[in-house]
Structure formats: structure tokens, C-alpha cells
Image (tube, helix red, strand yellow):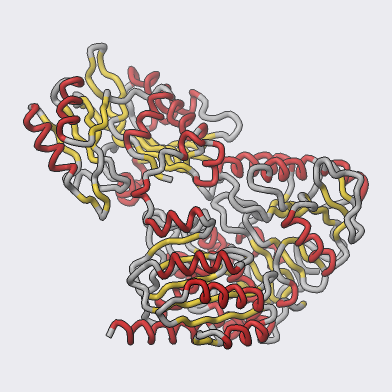
Amino acid sequence: MAILADSHTRLIVQGITGREGDFHARQMHAYAPIVVGGVTPGKGGTVTDYGVPVFDTVGQAVRETGANASVIYVPAKFAPDAIMEAADAGIQLIVCITEGIPVLDMIRVRAYLDIRGATLLGPNCPGLLTPGQAKIGIIPANIAMPGDVGVVSRSGTLTYEAVHALTQAGLGQSTIVGIGGDPVHGLDFLDVIRMFNDDPQTQRIVMIGEIGGNDEERAAAWVKEHVKKPVVGFIAGRSAPEGRRMGHAGAIIEGSSGTAQAKIEAMRAAGIKVADLPTQIPALLL
Amino acid sequence: MKLHEYQSKQIFARFGVPVPRGILAENATEARNAARELGLPVVIKAQVLVGGRGKAGGVKVAHTMEEVEVLAERILSLTIKGLPVRRVLIDRAADIRGELYLGVTIDRARRRAVLMASSAGGVDIEEVAATTPERIVKVPVDPFIGLPDYLARDVAVSIGLAREHWPKFIHVARGLVKAFVDNDASLAEINPLALVATDGGIGLMALDGKMVIDDNALFRHPDLAVMRDPDEESEAERKARNADLNFVSLDGNIGCLVNGAGLAMATLDIIQHFGGKPANFLDVAGGARADKVATALRIVLADPKVKVVMFNIFGGITRCDEVARGIVQAIEEVRPTVPMVARITGTNKAEGDRILASANLITAESAAEAAQKAVALANAAAA
């Protein structure tokens, strides 16, 4: 089962001939044969050396390949347009890896997607990985293995660290989902935890949050009411000073809101076990 | 990127928000000339990018030309929260009859810009929000429509503004929202938005102004990008920004180089967990090529407080051996004199460890072990 993507997903890569897109399209294609096409305006009609057809528009790609998911590697200036193009073409799952999109653009894009009913993951995220079935994005597949732990995170390498630790402890993953570090994004913790809660393969959930916003608090409140599966969490940024953006645009403590302490307290109050160090996560799941 | 009060007010004025006549001055003579042109009394306001200027003595009213010179001189000699006052804004003093608060910011949970207003103006709005949240009225800004008149009027009614001021308030609210949107701001704030007596009756006027611009949008606002005050960031932070590195200086003595923002934050937490103090947050970002690692290492070592450097690297798509080669090459180029602890894991870890072992590095198996070693070395150096 898993969530969001599996071996039946039909994926296109927007920006497939760019430097990032080319590199990661090859990796995704090598991992699982779900990549059915790519889009680069002006390069339509060509085929990549690994056998994936390239189209000029997402609309064409969808008509020709029956794609139902897209992953976006185009630069920040063009990414909002790429997301809207995918939604307009009827793509149901849009994963945007691109970092550095202006917040007001994302507000407009989200409003546009909500009208069209498309699901967005990201931007500024590592994408998702259903071990053994589908890789959409940049999560290194060799650190993961199939299993029953659902992982949702706002971070990239910190997630990899946690997944690596899980795998080494013999705990495989159902799906690993990176929701991204921007203030306005698509799926949030609550959305993904809800999916994990409904997914029969997922028996345990790991959530890795960070300072800024209140996504984690809202998810924790929902967990308390609805989730029977064990949930383990970690929050990065306990030592972060107020008002300084810690890399991610969304990782900032503004006044009293968004502190690690508030998030950890909300999670503990919801029965979520919170690890002090990322490497403690596997032990708390057992 | 933060804008100064005078810059914010210039932008507000372009969007139809009334502001006092004001002139920027860098010394007492310029301040006196400004006051002569504006007419007394005037308000002299320190232009520094931190809050709490008033409490620090950075805002004063002058009634005579002598006062203008003395006060301008005094304010220009201040350092407020570590920032030297290089300029003062001389504003014509207003005849204030009431103070409101008006601001636009991003509401992450609602995924909208929101207009916030309060009849409790002129005070710290965070405090109003904490103690009497019912005194703040919020309405969302539609991403496609903007702020319609009726919503601005709703706000005016909700904060109890007298009927005769509604048209002016609607004009100011719409202007502020447009200034926010058109300039890709993440904050646009008027505190206080004052009711002031003018020749034509009571008017609304922005007596203060604050704007923060979304750094990610500066590519389409070259006019704003040049307004950046170099005092806003340290030299190290500026160098890091130019090199495309995420860097924040902190006040400890353990320099950190990490790939990934989340892992970098977690690394600081781990160091603190073991009783150490990180000197910086630094995300070398994806790839971690040798030249980028070398630049990062130089920036970290430029801080004289740094007694030890800790690398915490997760090799994902970029393999550990590549990153390890980058680190070794960077060390050869930079030749640091402080001890270094490296922890590297993930794809091709064994090969990465082997490369690091050939360099003059202390290695660790886990981030916790690396942090403990770094803390011990930092403490030994400080003793």
C-alpha cells in the first residue's frame, strides 16, 4: 500500500533536461520504472539517452503518457508557473523540489491548486520515497528499506539521517515524505499523518519537525484525537535564537511563536515520544 | 531583508499612505538644516534595524535649533543593540490625537497575507497580542483580488474608528496592502498610524514604518536589493550569502559545517545538549564540493572565537567519499590551526572515513560522539 506513490505511479519530470533534473531523473528511473516522460519547453519530440520521451508542455505529456504525478526541478523564477501548468493539465500529485520561491508566489499557487483539487508536496523539499516501489525527488534510496514506519519531515539531510538510523536498526519504511521548509507549502504534517493513519502498511509514524510556524502543534492535536499508531517525533532548533532564519525560509522563531519548546510540549501532550537526538528515534519506536 | 524606517515610509508614500515630511541627516549640521526646512518642533529618530529604539534613547523631540543639534549629536553617537546609529530621520512633529496599529504579514496557517489592525497603537503589538488578543482584528488578503473596500471598512468598524475617518482608513489600508504585495514584503507595519490635526481637519498619518522584504523575491526588485544596509549582517554573513551558503553567526566557540539546514540546526542542538556553545549555523547545502567547503571553512575560521571546528555530514546523493575529498582539499587550502572533528555517514561511509583518516582530523562515528569531542576540545582551549 504505502501512501502517495507506489509502483503504479506514472511520473513526469518537469525540467528533465536541466542539470538537476537530468541528474535526478536518471536516479529515479534507475530506482523504479515509473518515469514515463519529461517536459522541457523547446525540447519536445526528443528522447533521453535512457529512453524517456520529452514533451514541450505538461498537457502533451499527460495526453501521451497518462501521467498522474509530476516532479519539478525548474529554477525558482519559473517554478510557480510549472506547478500551475501541472495542475491545469490534471496532474494529481505535484512534487516541487525547487528552493527559493517567493512566499507570495506560493500563496497564489496554493490558492490556484486548491481550486483545481491537485495535491502539492513542497516546494523546497526532498520529495518522497516508497522503498522498493517509487522514488519521486532526491531522497537517497540506498539508505531506505521497505517496512511499516511512515516518516514525515520538514528537513532533507536530517530525514536521511533518521531513515538511515531506522534502516540500520532493522526498521523499514512504508513511505518517507519530505514536506519542505518553506512557510507556505503543500501537504503539511497533519495531511501526511492522516494518510499514514489510514494506510494499512504503516504501523508506526515518525515526524521530524523544526522551529517556525505551528504545523507540528496542529498535527499533534490531531494525533491526540485520532491516531492509535505509535508516533515518535524530533524537533530541530532547540538552540536557535529568535528572529534568525536558520537556513529554511520557514525555520524562524517570531516572537513567542514557533519555538522548539512549544512544539515539543504540544507533541508530548499528545502522547508523542520526542527524541532528544535524531539517533534515539529507532529505540523509541521499539 | 529589513528596510529602514525612512525607506519604508518612502515606499508607503508612493502607495498613497500619508507620512510626515522628513529629511535624513548624518550629522548635527545636516540635522539643523533639515529642521530649518521642516520647521520646529521636529522628531529625531535613529535609523537602525532593530526594535526598541525609543527605550534606548534613539527617538527624541526637539523644540529649538539648539536642541536639534544636541539631540542629533547624541543619538548619532549611540550604539543600539550592537548597531551604530549612522543616520537620523528628522520628521516634522505631528499633533497627535490618537494612535492605531496597522500591519500586513503572512499568516502561515491560513496561507494568506493578513491585514492586522488595532486601536491600541503606538505600543508593542506583540504584547497586545499576548495580553489582549481581542484588540487585534485580522482579515485575510485575497491572493487574486487583494483587499476589497468592504473588508477594510469591516476592520475600521471592528476597531471602533469614528465614522468620519473610514474613507481615509480604507485608503491607507488598501495602500499598505498594495505596498506589501507589490514589493514582495513579508512584513509591512505602521505603528503608530496616528490621527493627527492638520489644517484640513483630522487626518491619518504613518508616524513610523517598518518593512521586511522576502529575500527570495529580490531578483525581481533590483530597486529594493540596493537598499540593503550592510549593518544588517556581519561581514561573515555577507560573504556567506555571496557564496550561496546559509550562515548565521552565534556567540559560542565551536565552529560548525553541516550539509542541510535541518541537520545543521540539529547539530547545534546536539552541541548544546553536551554543554557546548556553537559559534555558527552553517549549511553548506547540496553537493558540498571542495571549493564550497573551503569557502565555508574560511568563513567559520575567520571568527576568532572559534576554538574547534566540527563537521557533520550526511552523504546522500553526494557520496561520503566525494564530500571527504572536498573536506581534505579545503583543509589543505585553508590550513586551519584549530583542531577539527569530523563525522561523516551515509552513502560510501567507509571510503569517506578512509580519506578523512589520511588528513589531520579527529573522526567520530556519531554526531553525539563528534559533539562530545568538540566540546572537550573547546573547553580545553578555553581553560
Up/down of A24 relative to B25, above or below? below
Spot the residue most to the top.
B200
State the residue at coordinates (84%, 51%).
A38
Q: How many marks?
A: 0
Residue B113 location, x and y as percent? 51, 40
Asked whether residue A114 is in view, the answer is no
Query: Which quadrant is home to the C terminus of chain B?
Result: bottom left
Asked whether residue A247 is in view, the answer is yes
Query: Which quadrant is home to the N terminus of chain B?
Result: top left
Residue A270 location, x and y as percent? 52, 70
State the residue at coordinates (71%, 49%).
A74
**A34 on left or right of B12:** right
Tell which of A86 and B66 is nearer to you. B66
Residue B79 location, x and y as percent? 21, 51
State the residue at coordinates (86%, 57%).
A10
Residue B45 location, x and y as percent? 22, 37
Tell which of A123 and A174 is nearer to you. A123
Tell which of A11 and B376 is nearer to you. B376
**A65 on left or right of A164:** right
Figure quadrant of residue B320:
bottom right
**B20 on left or right of A36:** left
State the residue at coordinates (78%, 40%).
A88
Tell which of A255 and B300 is nearer to you. B300
